[in-house]
Image (cartoon, grey):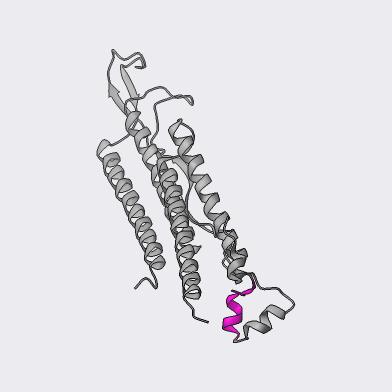
Amino acid sequence: MSLLSAMDTSASGLMAEKRRMELIAQNVANIETTRTTEGGPYKRKVAVFREVLDNQLSGNAGDKFNRAGVEVAEVITAEKEPLRVYDPQHPDADQDGYVLKPNINLADEIVDSITASRAYSANVTVLNTTKEMAVKALSIGRG
Amino acid sequence: MLNLNIFSLGSIPVSPGSLINGKSTGETSQGSQPAASFKDVLAQKLEQANALQKQADQLTESFMTGGEADIHEMLIAMEKADLALRETVEIRNKLVDAYKEIEKMQI
């Protein structure tokens, strides 16, 4: 059933966009974070996608579905200089009263989240269209 | 379980190759490779539909109990199970149609 493998492809898209959304949530949640396990302020994380395409495209599909779609290849940490904010009351302030804060632009993150959400919706639309096709195929010969 | 032998459909080869190669059905059934019978194909389809239902069940349970499953995984599994069931029902309908047609036959 090759239509089901098209559904799997859409599913991989949903999974990738979900992963991207998780990272955006992480970035927004940590917009004020000054302490991390590796030390220093939080650094923005970005997902990098990679195409998945198994070349088992020959022969009958049978039970072996051709794996195709997208996956998160890696999560990169943006190496942008942290912001230096003057806040002498802060416990993590240095001797001059400056605190290193994550260099995250909220507007960028919100735009990214909208993009991820739209891409997710697009994958759902493709999935529904695939299903519609399968249902249409089942109505062949019904008049 | 359906007893398909009453329709004698077990001997009908459904290998698509026989249609493409233009061979008669008699040749195919007597060839070295026995063609998959309709009964076998139907049983396999039922098995597939059942497996998809089970997978959907499993993912639903996992999602409901706060397991690893994602909401989209669960819903896609349910859609797949739904499609497989519809396909099975459609095949059943065709089979019953064929049976009725034979039943109506005047000898």
The correct choice, above or below, for A51 with respect to A86 in the image is below
The quadrant of the rendering that contains the C terminus of chain A is bottom left
The answer to whether any part of residue A106 appears in the image is: yes
Nearest the camera: B43 or A81? B43
**In the visual, does B104 lie left or right of A109?**
right
Give the residue drawn at x 43%, y 33%.
B64
Nearest the camera: A97 or A112? A112
Give the residue drawn at x 67%, y 80%.
B28
Q: Is B16 within the magenta?
A: yes
- Residue B101 point in image, percent of width and height: 47, 74
Q: Is A59 within the magenta?
A: no
- Residue B46 point in image, percent of width and height: 55, 57
Q: Quadrant of residue B7?
A: bottom right
The part of the chain drawn in magenta is: B11-21
Give the residue drawn at x 27%, y 40%.
A110
The correct choice, above or below, for A82 with respect to A142 in the image is above
- Residue A96 point in image, percent of width and height: 32, 16
Give the residue drawn at x 35%, y 13%.
A91
**In the visual, does A24 lie left or right of A107?**
right
**In the visual, does A42 lie left or right of A108?**
right
